[in-house]
Image (cartoon, helix red, strand yellow):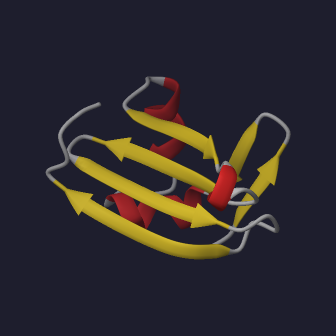
Amino acid sequence: MRLEIAAGGVTVEAEDLAPLLGLTAAEVPRLMREGRITGLVEEGRDADAGRTRVTFRYKAIRLRFTLDAAGRILSQSRVDGAAPG
């Protein structure tokens, strides 16, 4: 799995994200356009400076990655049944 940090956000290949959400790669772009898969990028501050947290939500699934400044995954978690918001 590879996530790339770029100006304005983070990119991930649909082929990498899809199986983690129980989807096919072809479904991911459409569901993102429809707003059914959402993403949030948060830049670390203070003790977390240089880290980025990326969260994807789809239905009751919350998928979260913590990345270092080079985009390497430091941690990954998936929670099923996560409350919205």
Residue depicted at x 85% and y 39%: 7
Q: Is residue 66 above or below residue 36?
A: below
The quarter holding residue 8 reads top right
Q: Is residue 50 left or right of residue 80?
A: right
Q: Is residue 44 above or below residue 83?
A: below
- The outermost residue toward the front is 46
- The outermost residue toward the top is 34
Q: Is residue 36 left or right of residue 55?
A: left
Residue depicted at x 78% and y 53%: 5
Q: Is residue 11 above or below residue 15?
A: above
The x, y position of residue 32, in whole percent, is: 49, 33
Residue 33 appears anywhere in the view: yes
Residue depicted at x 72% and y 40%: 9
The number of callouts visible is 0
The quarter holding residue 41 reads top right
- Residue closest to the eye, 40 or 45: 45
- Residue closest to the eye, 56 or 34: 56
Q: Is residue 64 left or right of residue 66?
A: left
The quarter holding residue 37 reads top left
| Quadrant location of the N terminus in the rendered image | bottom right
Q: Is residue 1 left or right of residue 81?
A: right
Residue depicted at x 62% and y 73%: 73
| Quadrant location of the C terminus in the rendered image | top left
